[in-house]
Image (cartoon, rainbow, N blue to C red):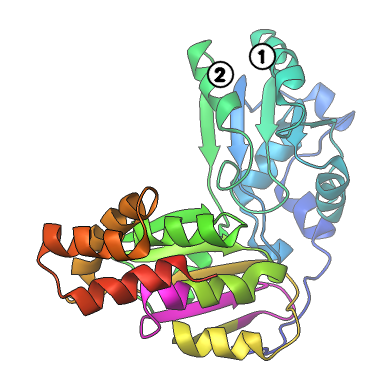
């Protein structure tokens, strides 16, 4: 795609009115079609046309919508011609909101949970609410739909038969490299979310720890007007973004699985991380070389990659 423009989302409000029963005062005289419970509703990650008919019906029939940011969700609902009571629910007020939401469910209400974009609970708050609802005996229903990680996987051309979603890496270099070392040998495609300001540094660390020759993809602004997908090796991608201005938008990084030779490295990396925590570089290399039987030069290079910066 590489920056190819897509048409912006049209006004769906008239279309929605033909497909979803009216909410608010008009719905008061109609039989209720949504059973009490918590509904985890996926919303579009960009293009508003990607919402499902079931999601629209659920949002239209819910008694209240719990969301990260009421302004974001309010604008989203307005785009479909819907107006519902909104309650903010995020990491910073979860302890305060949880009893209120459980009380509403206990009173027989239908509560819809959404994130700012995509599927709730995927690198977003919400799992504690789901956990508490199940513990209290309330029904929890998932209303599936858009997801940035699945959209990136489906379009990047890397293996999809086995993958691991690792969310956001730590912002600090040392912690980030340590976590990458733990993931290096997993025989699966790796999927990460990343912020635009940290993209260049993260790609550089990935090239150093995972190996610059591993194939990868950087997906930006998926389903939006300036959607962009770049595929290359980690070293090539790191070089490209090092030379460019900080990109804008939401980003997904997909890294292909290691080859057979690389798959032998994770145990070495994990042992090195442990050894380097209490020993000098020289002693750690010697200890891991003796424990694994690997070539000392290879262990030394891995140790350097883990300690650089």
Estimate the x, y position of residue 101 in percent, counting from the top left.
71, 18
* Quadrant holding the C terminus: bottom right
Q: Is residue 70 visible?
A: yes
Estimate the x, y position of residue 263 in percent, counting from the top left.
21, 68
Give the mark nearest the N terminus, 1 or 2. Answer: 1
Residue at image mark 1: 102
* Quadrant holding the N terminus: bottom right
* Marks 1 & 2, CB-CB < 8 Å contact: yes
Residue 207 in magenta? yes
Q: Is residue 259 visible?
A: no
Residue at image mark 2: 133
- The span shown in magenta is 206-228
How packed mark 2 is, by other alpha carbons closer than 10 Å (few <14, some 14-19, many 20 or more), is many
Alpha carbon separation for disc pair 1 and 2: 7 Å
Q: Quadrant of residue 64?
A: top right
In this picture, residue 109 sits left or right of residue 24: left
Residue 256 in magenta? no
Please tell me which residue lies in front, 202 or 134: 202
């Amino acid at each position: 795609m590489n920056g190819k423009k897509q048409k912006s989302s049209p006004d769906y409000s008239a279309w929605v009115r033909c497909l979803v029963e009216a909410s608010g005062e008009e719905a008061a005289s109609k039989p209720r079609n949504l059973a009490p419970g918590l509904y985890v509703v996926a919303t579009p990650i960009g293009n508003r046309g990607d919402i499902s008919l079931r999601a629209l019906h659920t949002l239209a029939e819910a008694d209240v919508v719990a969301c990260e940011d009421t302004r974001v969700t309010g604008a989203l609902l307005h785009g479909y011609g819907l107006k519902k009571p909104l309650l903010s629910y995020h990491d910073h007020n979860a302890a305060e909101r949880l009893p209120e939401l459980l009380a509403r469910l206990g009173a027989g209400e239908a509560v819809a949970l959404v994130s700012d974009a995509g599927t709730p609970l995927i690198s977003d708050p919400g799992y504690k609410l789901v956990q508490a609802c199940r513990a209290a005996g309330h029904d929890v229903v998932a209303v599936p739909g858009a997801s940035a990680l699945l959209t990136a996987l489906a379009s990047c051309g890397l293996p999809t038969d086995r993958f691991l979603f690792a969310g956001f890496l730590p912002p600090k270099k040392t912690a980030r490299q340590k976590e990458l070392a733990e993931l290096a040998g997993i025989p699966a495609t790796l999927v990460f979310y990343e912020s635009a300001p940290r993209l260049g540094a993260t790609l550089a660390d990935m090239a150093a720890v995972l190996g610059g020759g591993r194939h990868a993809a950087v997906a930006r602004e998926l389903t939006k007007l300036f959607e962009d997908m770049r595929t290359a090796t980690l070293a090539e991608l790191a070089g490209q973004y090092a030379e460019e201005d900080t990109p804008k938008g939401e980003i997904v990084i997909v890294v292909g699985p290691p080859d057979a030779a690389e798959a032998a490295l994770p145990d070495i990396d994990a042992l090195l991380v442990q050894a380097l925590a209490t020993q000098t570089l020289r002693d750690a290399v010697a200890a891991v070389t003796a424990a694994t039987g690997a070539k000392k030069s290879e262990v030394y290079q891995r140790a350097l990659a883990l300690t650089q910066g």
